[in-house]
Image: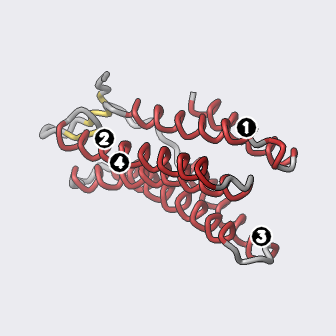
Amino acid sequence: MPDTLVTTIDYMPVGDISVLALCLLILILFLGTFVDRNEQYRLFWLIIGCIFFGTMSGLAYHQMLGSTDSVNPVLITIIRDVSYILYQATLLIYVKYILILVSIEGRERRKLHILTAAAFLIFLAVQILGNIFHFGFYIDKSGTVHNGGSIFFAITFAFFVGIIFYMLFRYRNRMIPQIATGILLTFILCIILLA
């Protein structure tokens, strides 16, 4: 995997702060409009929570990385990992949300649960082992940041998006077309922004 040395920080917190504000706005609207407190309600809370705390972790990571003060490299690594793990957990929960939304049951549901849980656990293992064995993100003794292994984050993201697209196309007759279109456009926008 390519190893990228981070020498300058070209980071502006505006995007992260906007995401935090949107999460709070969504929760306020959600509390006022969601009537049925079912499993979808709890999953939606988990999704927003993962996005919110993942963004908080990402914001803290970038602020610590750009700080002129001496910051513990282990703490920076942990905060970055928390951010990445929460973003992947968001997708895992989102898959579960769509499984409920399109009423996938039985063997197909178990298969998708196992497949996505395995992908998440593999991502988690690679993320942690990459830090330990220096094929992922790490900060060396001289303070240089090595950002290798981020490609696996992108691969796992693509896997989850692929599963979501599969479910949306395979079970499109079970969804309200406007909701399916909204989900598709959201992920297409995410892919464009990540590219």
Q: Marks 4 and 3, Cα distance to the nearest angstrom?
A: 33 Å
Q: Which of marks 2 and 1 is nearer the N terminus?
A: 2
Q: Where is residue 16 in the image (x, y as percent from the top left)?
A: 56, 51
Mark toward the viewer: 4 or 3: 4
Which mark, by number, is residue 170?
1
Circles 2 and 4: CB atoms closer than 8 Å = yes
Give the alpha-carbon distance from disc 1 to disc 3, as whole Å: 31 Å
Q: Which residue lies furthest to the top in this view?
A: 2
Which numbered disc, 4 or 1, marks the residue that appears first in the sequence? 4
Give the left or right position of residue 12, taking residue 25 as reference.
left
Q: In which quarter of the image is the C terminus?
A: top right
What is the crowding at mark 2: few (fewer than 14 residues within 10 Å), some, or many (at least 20)? Answer: some
Q: Where is mark 3, residue-wise? A: 29
Q: Is mark 3 on a helix, strand or loop?
A: helix
**Amino acid at pointer 4:** Leu
Amino acid, disc 3:
Leu
Q: Pointer 4: residues within 10 angstroms few (<14), some, or many (20+)?
A: some
